[in-house]
Amino acid sequence: MATVASPKVYKNYINGEWVEGSGGKAIEDRNPANRDELVGMFPSSTEADVNLAVDAAKEAFKSWRLVPAPKRAEILYRTAEILVSRKEDYARDMTREMGKVLAETRGDVQEAIDMTYLMAGEGRRQFGQTTPSELPNKFAMAVRSPIGVAALVTPWNFPMAIPSWKIAPALVMGNTVVLKPAEDTPYSSYNFVQVLAEAGLPRGVVNIVNGTGPDAGAPLVHHRDTQLVSFTGSTEVGRIISEACAPTFKKCHLEMGGKNIIIVMDDANLDLALDGVLWGAFGTSGQRCTAASRVAVQKKVYREFTARLAERAKALRVGDGLDPETDMGPTINEQQLQTVIKYVEIGKNEGAKLTTGGHRLDSGAYSRGWFHEPTVFVDVDPNMRIAQEEIFGPVVSAIPFDTFEQALEIANGVVYGLSSSLYTRNVNNAFRALRDLETGIVYINAPTIGAETHLPFGGIKNTGNGHRESGLAALDFYSEWKSLYIDYSDKLQRAQIDNAE
Ligand code: UN1
């Protein structure tokens, strides 16, 4: 008789223990390349679980903030080292729950390793400022100070990297954390936090509450004892979170949508640009905030370039990310796939020309997953919805243009501002683009994806709310400046008054 292996049941992590969710309900973590495969069951938590986790983090903050930062950092170094030793296993786990190909999930784990090492280094830096006082016998300086409990809400597309972008700087600066990972990809967050625990993180410093946005994310963001909120996801949800933080002035970092462009000038190395567009548009099945979803091509090379793009896109092998032959994996779930299908319809109705793709893949083994063909629209007008709205799938819109100035106008003519790219051999245009493209990240002769962990990451306009993560910028979000004055004159010295002459 055939037996069905029972799925592995995972728990929340609260105050150093793996505990069941209080509601008794569970969420399935399924493989998007094969929905018959259940990766695990995770709690569908409620406000009661969130309260326990925030209480634990609040209590742990009392002592964690006093642990010397270099000692906090040692735990991060150990974490990074364990991650290095398990990189392959964690990449495979991630491909099973998220779908992207192994090369990319290895990159995701690597990004978590890079960020953890980077922030560990900040244990012995996080430099402040010392400055002369305006008064004699008085010392003045400003130091970075921890804030409290950080509520972190993370997306499914970078299920280990993005939690690490938030957790590592939060910890090294002395904050404690409650993480609500995306319900589609909780296993990679589980792996990351499991390693932090093994590396010796004291109880309560990081907690995980699994569940949906409305049931677990909302009470976490609203909780009176969470002082910091960091969210990566859609602009729509970002707006709700921003509003939830406003009444109590919570420090809130939002990383939201994008409509990133690659501009190809006729003087560019076209082979290089083609490789860049394919990687930027179809890497991670287009499911990156940084994905290239528009490609503007100068008219002289437009026909040739778009024809070659369609040919190359058509040749991409779509399949299970664990198969080394696969170039592009599935989309994350049925809902995301339906969004892609909807936008293909919108594009066709708007009069854009579909040159390859445009269909769900559902024959044979594809029928068990959420696959979509790599899709190229050409002759797209920059004002069409497919050229304005975030799709988050394997769809790229090609837009012809005449002059460099027009290309900049097209590039900047969207509500988002995360990433942009220019392919050219003209150094003057390259520098003008670096100055004039209205995005938080600009690439020259490289696609819109591929940010490194030690530079600020984030966008302007409807992509962000003025904060950055990664690099030194992350320290600014996860700490407050505290200015300190020490008067050793033994008398009252009045600033702005006693220094008058
Ligand atoms: C995201 O798309 O949400 O620059 C993050 C990149 C990656 C990070 C992407 N390093 O594409």
Image: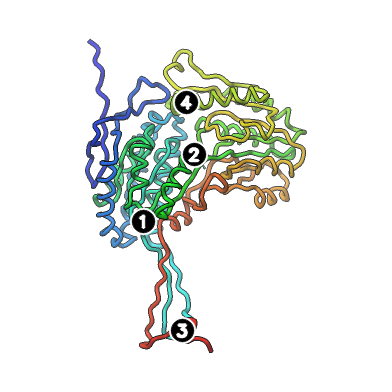
Separation of disc 2 and disc 4 at Cα?
24 Å
Q: Position of residue 425 (x, y in %)?
A: 71, 44
Picture disc at residue 236: 2
Name the element at disc 3. loop
Q: Nearer the viewer, mark 1 or mark 3?
A: 3
Q: Which residue is mark 4?
A: 330
Q: Nearer the viewer, mark 2 or mark 1?
A: 2
Separation of disc 4 and disc 3 at Cα?
65 Å
Whether the residues at callouts 1 and 4 have beta carbons within 8 Å, the answer is: no
* Mark sitting earlier along the chain (1/3): 3
Residue nearer the viewer, 427 or 233: 233
Q: Position of residue 363 (x, y in %)?
A: 48, 13
Residue nearer the viewer, 293 or 58: 58
Q: Which residue is mark 3?
A: 135
Q: Residue at x 47, y 78 (%)?
A: 132
Separation of disc 1 and disc 4 at Cα?
36 Å
Q: Nearer the viewer, mark 4 or mark 3?
A: 3
Name the element at disc 1. helix
- Whether the residue carrying mark 4 lies under 8 Å from ligand 1 is answered with no
Tell whether 192 sits left or right of 363. left
In which quadrant is the N terminus drawn? top left
Q: Position of residue 248 (x, y in %)?
A: 39, 54
Q: Nearer the viewer, mark 2 or mark 4?
A: 2
Q: Which residue is mark 1?
A: 172
Q: Residue at x 41, y 52 (%)?
A: 247
* Mark sitting earlier along the chain (1/4): 1
